[in-house]
Structure formats: C-alpha cells, structure tokens
Image (cartoon, rainbow, N blue to C red):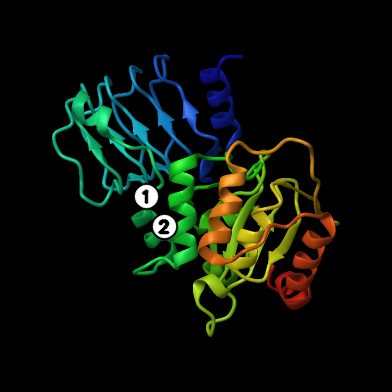
C-alpha cells in the first residue's frame, strides 16, 4: 500500500462528521490525489505539490507549512488555517485571506529559497490566547527553531494544535478550554499540555500533563520551569492507564548538551541525572494535581 492508498483508507474509516487528524505530516506530492475531506487536521507539513487537487476542503488545518504549488487550485477558502507558510507558486491563486496563514505566503522561487519553516511565535500566541508568551516558553520555541524537532530531547518536539485534539482523552468541555498543547511527548503520538487550572497563576506557573497515545493522563511537572528540567533527562515517556515512566537509554539526542547548557545559563535549571531525580520531580507535581486532574477528566 502506497502513501496515497494509506491516506484514502484512513479517510474511508473516519466517520463523515468527525475531524480526521493526521500526525507527522502528510506528504503526497506528485501523486494522483484529487480530493481532500472536509474537517482535516494535519500536524506537521502538508505536501500536495503537483497533485490533481483543484480545490481545498472546508476547515482544513495545517500546523506546519502547506504546499499546494503546481496544482489547479484557484481560490483559498476563509476556513483554511495554516500555522506555517503557504506555498502557492505556479497556481492561479490571486488572493489569500489575511486570516488563513500565520506564516509567509510564498509566490515565487526567490521567496521559497528565503522562507524559514520555523515555529511561528504568533501562532502560539493565538492558541495560548496571550499578547506575549512567557519568557521560558518563548525561549524553548526559539531553541527548537535553531536546533530542530526531536533533536535535543528524545521524542520531544513543539507544534501548534488547538483544544480539539484533547477529545481523544476527555469529553469535558471545561477541561479542554483549560488545556494548551505544547507538542509531542514521544515518538508514538503522546502529547504534552499546559493545564490552566489555577487562575491565580501565570501561564508558566501552571502544571504540565502528558496524554498517552495508548491511554493515561499524568501530571509530569508542577510548572514550566520543572518541565524544562524534565527535558534535561533526554528521555521520552512511556504511558498507560496504570503509570508513566521515563526509561533512559544509551543514546543522546544530537543537541542535548547544548540544551542543558542553554537552560542552565538562562534559567539556572540543573540537569536531571538519575531516574530517582525524575521520580521526585514528577511525584511532587502529582501530589498537588493528579487527583484533581482525574476528577476533571
């Protein structure tokens, strides 16, 4: 089964009224793709260059860059949301609504060469509903933009996603309104989120939750500073309904040493060296918030 056939099978299996979410990007450039379903979310980049597409679906959301260059697409729907760049080279698109793209509109080869595919700070501001990002969060975005996704802590990478992603774990609309996705927690699809559960605390003073791809929702840090420290252990979590643990292996992420030095220099955060230190950090946070979270779910 090729990539297009796999995607089409996912569409067939998805209920007509449901929002289909594709994680890890969708790369179908140069294929016979001619149709995309409405209510599609793509976490990562979406490559549809040189396909048979002639229109974009309603309520398409792409957290990375959307490539529709060299297609028959002529109009951009107002319901489109792109958090990265939008590549419309070699199309008949004349106008792009100002609200659909938070990155750069790429119309020429020269613009494509100069465009960066970085995390967009404005996209995070919009999702987090803040005028300015807390300093530590802003620093983490800039660090990832420089050193890359999954390149400084195993399995971890930031991306933009709205509250609808949490429907996989809870049906509580109140809880979903309080959650803000940070990004990927491990390579199998778990995610980290800030839980805005205390109105008296700033955004970076709120606890962090790990949502498991196979189930389980666990508090992992008391605040964003402790979360940054958790990343210094360079380990991705394994989650279940019963527990969460961080198993250390012998591999070190390519830029992990740079990350450890960075948070030490900028925030006086010391590296976690042992599993016992990890357990202590998590246990402290769970003692404050885990039971409250279980009730909220």
User: In percent of the image, x 42 and y 32: which residue is there?
Assistant: 46
> Depth check: 186 or 214 in front?
186
Q: Is residue 169 at least partly visible in the picture?
A: no
283 displayed left or right of 149: right
**Residue at the extreme left of the image, as rendered:** 94
Q: Is residue 154 at least partly visible in the picture?
A: yes
Residue 68 percent across, percent down from the top left: 31, 27
Crowd tier of the residue under label 1, counting other residues whose Cα lies within 10 Å: few below 14, some 14–19, many 20 or above: many
- Is disc 1 in contact with disc 2, using a CB cutoff of under 8 Å? yes
Vertical side of 223 occupied by 279: above or below: above
User: In percent of the image, x 42 and y 60: which residue is there?
Assistant: 127
> Depth check: 108 or 282 in front?
282
Crowd tier of the residue under label 2, counting other residues whose Cα lies within 10 Å: few below 14, some 14–19, many 20 or above: many
Vertical side of 27 occupied by 261: above or below: below
Residue 8 percent across, percent down from the top left: 53, 24
Q: Quadrant of the N terminus?
A: top right
Residue 233 percent across, percent down from the top left: 71, 51
- Residue 124, labelled with which disc? 2
Q: Pointer 1: what residue?
A: 120
Q: Secondary structure at mark 2?
A: helix
> Depth check: 101 or 219 in front?
219
**Residue at the extreme bottom of the image, as rendered:** 200
State which quadrant residue 179 falls in.
Answer: bottom right
């Amino acid at each position: 089964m090729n990539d297009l056939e796999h995607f089409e099978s996912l569409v067939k299996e998805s209920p007509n009224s449901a929002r289909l979410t594709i994680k890890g990007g969708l790369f179908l450039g140069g294929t016979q793709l001619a149709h995309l379903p409405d209510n599609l979310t793509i976490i990562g980049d979406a490559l549809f260059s040189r396909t048979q597409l002639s229109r974009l679906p309603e309520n398409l959301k792409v957290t990375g860059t959307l490539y529709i260059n060299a297609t028959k697409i002529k109009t951009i729907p107002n319901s489109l949301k792109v958090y990265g760049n939008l590549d419309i080279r070699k199309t008949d698109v004349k106008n792009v609504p100002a609200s659909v793209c938070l990155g750069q509109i790429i119309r020429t080869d020269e613009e494509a060469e100069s465009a960066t595919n970085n995390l967009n700070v404005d996209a995070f501001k919009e999702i987090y509903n803040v005028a300015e990002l807390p300093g530590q969060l802003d620093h983490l975005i800039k660090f990832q933009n420089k050193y890359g996704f999954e390149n400084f802590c195993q399995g971890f990478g930031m991306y933009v996603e709205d509250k609808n992603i949490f429907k996989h774990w809870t049906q509580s609309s109140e809880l979903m309104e309080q959650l803000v996705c940070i990004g990927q927690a491990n390579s199998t699809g778990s995610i980290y989120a800030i839980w805005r559960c205390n109105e008296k605390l700033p955004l970076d003073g709120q606890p962090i939750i790990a949502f498991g791809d196979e189930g389980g929702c666990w508090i992992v840090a008391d605040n964003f500073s402790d979360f940054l420290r958790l990343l210094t252990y360079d380990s991705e979590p394994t989650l279940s309904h019963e527990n969460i643990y961080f198993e250390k292996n012998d591999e070190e992420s390519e830029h992990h040493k740079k990350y450890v030095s960075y948070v030490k220099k900028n925030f006086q955060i010391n590296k976690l060296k042992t599993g016992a230190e990890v357990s202590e950090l998590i246990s402290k946070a769970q003692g404050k918030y885990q039971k409250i979270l279980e009730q909220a779910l």
